[in-house]
Amino acid sequence: MVDRNIGVLISGRGSNLQSIIDAVADGRLDARIALVVSNKADAYGLERARNARIETLVLDHRAYQSREAFDQAMVDALRAREVQLVCLAGFMRLVSATFVNAFPNRILNIHPALLPSFPGLHAQRQALEHGVRFSGATVHMVDTDLDAGPIVMQAVVPVFTDDTEDTLSARILAEEHRIYPEAIGKILAGGWRLDGRRLVFG
Ligand code: GRF
């Protein structure tokens, strides 16, 4: 089971964390959530983890002198639990090379847009303001550039003329919850390789 140990990093609500917890609980995802790390002590996701009897750890980034020192503390905690794959789920910190190099091609993130469109904050608002007819969700590997690593899975949703940031976000979030556990399962299952930045299965 050790090779299926995952760590989840959060900063807030944790609904994507919940979708992973649920997928593990009902057998759709063959993994063990070994640790949930939050940089915010009041993140609601911590409660979700505790309810599921998953170990939690709060590491307040403000207590560290540098991004690298904070990232090294996360690396140490994840390695101590023999985590093989790290899943960022609403984790609102950029990760440095210290973190990325500790888990090469072993860090995933979920982003609420069809990357490479609309990276960064408020992706749903960016999509609305741009006037796109479709947006969606992207699971990608994490490198040191923001929302830029190889794409693992995407899902598309329509954007309607009467959408607000809230209605579009809710439509995208439902897809996030569907594809993130599936993408984690695909990466854990192996049998993939990177061809440039293209993830190739089989
Ligand atoms: C999600 O929209 C995710 O795509 C983005 O941050 C949000 C986190 O939501 N990275 P939650 O904490 O998983 O509910």
Image (tube, rainbow, N blue to C red):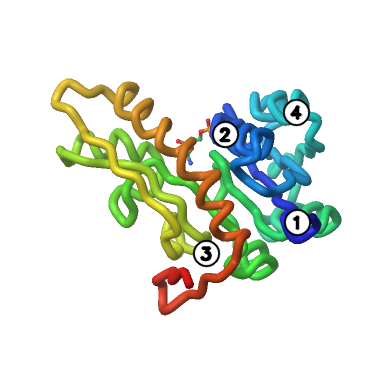
Residue at mark 3: C-beta within 8 A of ligand 1: no
Q: Which residue is mark 4?
A: 52
Q: Quadrant of the N terminus?
A: bottom right
Element at badge 3?
A: loop
Residue 19 - label: 2
Marks 4 and 1, the one that precedes in the sequence: 4
Q: Where does residue 45 sit, x and y in percent of width and height?
A: 65, 29
Q: CA distance from mark 3 to mark 1?
A: 20 Å
Q: Amino acid at mark 2?
A: Ser
Q: Where does residue 22 sit, x and y in percent of width and height?
A: 62, 32
Q: Specify the quadrant of the image occupied by residue 105.
A: bottom right
Question: Going by the picture, which residue comes out furthest to the right?
Answer: 80
Q: Specify the quadrant of the image occupied by residue 162.
A: top left
Q: Which residue is mark 1?
A: 83
- Label 2 close to label 4 by CB (< 8 Å): no
Residue at mark 4: C-beta within 8 A of ligand 1: no
Question: Going by the picture, which residue comes out furthest to the front?
Answer: 27
**Which of the two discs, 3 and 4, sits closer to the camera?**
4
Residue at 55% across, 29% down: 15
Residue at 40% across, 49% down: 138
In the rendered image, is residue 12 in sight? yes
Q: Residues within 10 Å of mark 4 (few under 14, many from 20)?
A: some
Q: CA distance from mark 4 to mark 1?
A: 18 Å
Q: CA distance from mark 3 to mark 4?
A: 31 Å
Q: Which residue is mark 3?
A: 144
190 on left or right of 138: right
Relative to 141, is 77 above or below?
A: above
